Image (cartoon, grey):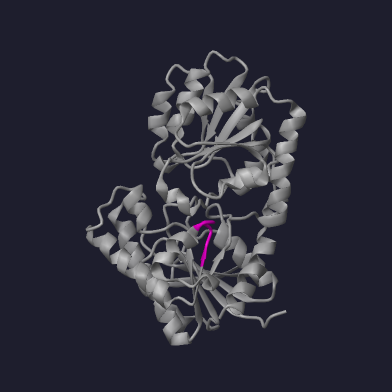
Amino acid sequence: MRDKKTIWIINQDATTPETGYAGRSYYLSEELSKLGHKVYLIAGGFSHLHFNSPEVKKAFDVRKVSTFNFVWLKLPSYANAHSKKRILNWFLFAFKISRLIKQLSHKPDVVIYSSPPLIGFLGALYIKIRSKAKLVFEIRDIWPLTLKEIGGFESYNPLILLMSLIEKLAYRKSDFVISNLSNAYKYLKRFNIDKKKFLWIPNGISLNELSKCTPLDDCVNNLIPKDKFVIGYSGTLGAANAMEFFIEASKRLRNNKRIFFVIVGTGKEKENLKSLVMGNENVIFLDPIPKEQIYSLLQRFDVCYIGWRNHKLYDYGIGANKLPEYLCSKKPIIHSYSGKKDIVKLAKAGISLPSESVEELVKAFDSVSKYQQDYLDELGRNGYEYAMQNLTYKSLAPKLINSIYSNL
């Protein structure tokens, strides 16, 4: 057993189960603290990702949650993800985390800065310099590359130029780099990162949250037909999810009276997608449901679906939170993905097919609806067993801290 450490995990958009979907930073904090480490998870008191933002009256508020300390930094509210005030909050957050070195009673041995956003890394670097802590840079999404490749921002945009400079600084000044993207090291090679200083830590599952599953509300449950073969998607409805191909495939199968499609979630593309299914009676849209009901929802699906754009960006892998949930549901998965290291294929948990191919989707939806139930159950079990062996935060947390100290 290694010496117990004080670990600061900084993720501006981190949440608790009460304020959002919790997620990676929350569950890693929980498991690291169970190993005996003193953990502070530091986040912004306002984010567009919050369901219920906490009330933060002072500059910062330290609260004991689960087994660790959650630090909320007071930030102004803003209207939506595209608000200019959101960008202002990035800079404000960077400044405020730099002040914590004087305000929190336990100085860090390890600082893990989780990106995006990138701007806050400047505050994390200041903490490293002042405390002599080891600095770990976490890549949950490759910024600014994703903003340019998917978001359409130009390389000469002033904010993109600033992010590029900070990105280079992060790789140069960090002692260790981790990512939820399985093939991220391919990208890191251009920055001359030693492979020994990189670790893939996939998005995982919390066994504690899995045990808290509650029944699906009747008002939702009754909207999902019980006499159909249900193919369902649950998650964000944004550009990256390429759900228009799912919709088009469902339209081509509208005369197949056995198959029914369910889409659960919200996002920037939701209204556009709803307009595409006008008059199509084999698709239903449902609003997001409470996190504790997710696994009950997935039990109403016969097959889970997730898809992506056909883009070179995904050669570095994907970090979907939804895939571990799908795997734990014991349901087969249809994965429309052309990138590297396909976890569905690796787990033998379903059907993988090229991205953005309506024809392939139609074939897959039709074929899977004709599978014997025993085979569907086998695919579901394969996924569940893979998740239990490889994707629990209980096993990922010690792997993380041991790897950091083994390679420093």
Q: Say which of 47 and 109 sits in front.
A: 109
The question of residue 66 being in magenta is answered with no
251 over 306 or under it: above or below: above
Percent x, y of residue 74: 41, 67
Establish if 179 lies above or below 377.
below
300 to the left or right of 44: right
> Would you say 317 lies left or right of 268 here?
right
Residue at the far right in the pictured view = 374
Relative image position of residue 161 (x, y in whole percent): 26, 63
Please identify the quarter of the rendering in which residue 57 is found.
bottom left
* Whole-percent x, y for residue 140 in the image: 48, 59
Which of these two is toward me, 364 or 73? 364
Residue drawn at x 74%, y 41% is 381
Pick the quarter of the image with the N terminus: bottom right
At 64% from the left and 66% from the top, the residue drawn is 397
Q: Main secondary structure of the magenta part?
A: loop
Residue 72 visible in the snapshot: yes
Residue located at (48% from left, 59% from top): 184
The count of marks equals 0
Query: Where does the C terminus fall, quadrant-wise?
Result: bottom right
Please identify the quarter of the rendering in which residue 215 is found: top right
Relative to 368, residue 215 above or below: below
| Residue range highlighted in magenta | 178-183
**Residue 276 screen position, x and y as percent:** 40, 24
Q: Is residue 301 visible?
A: no
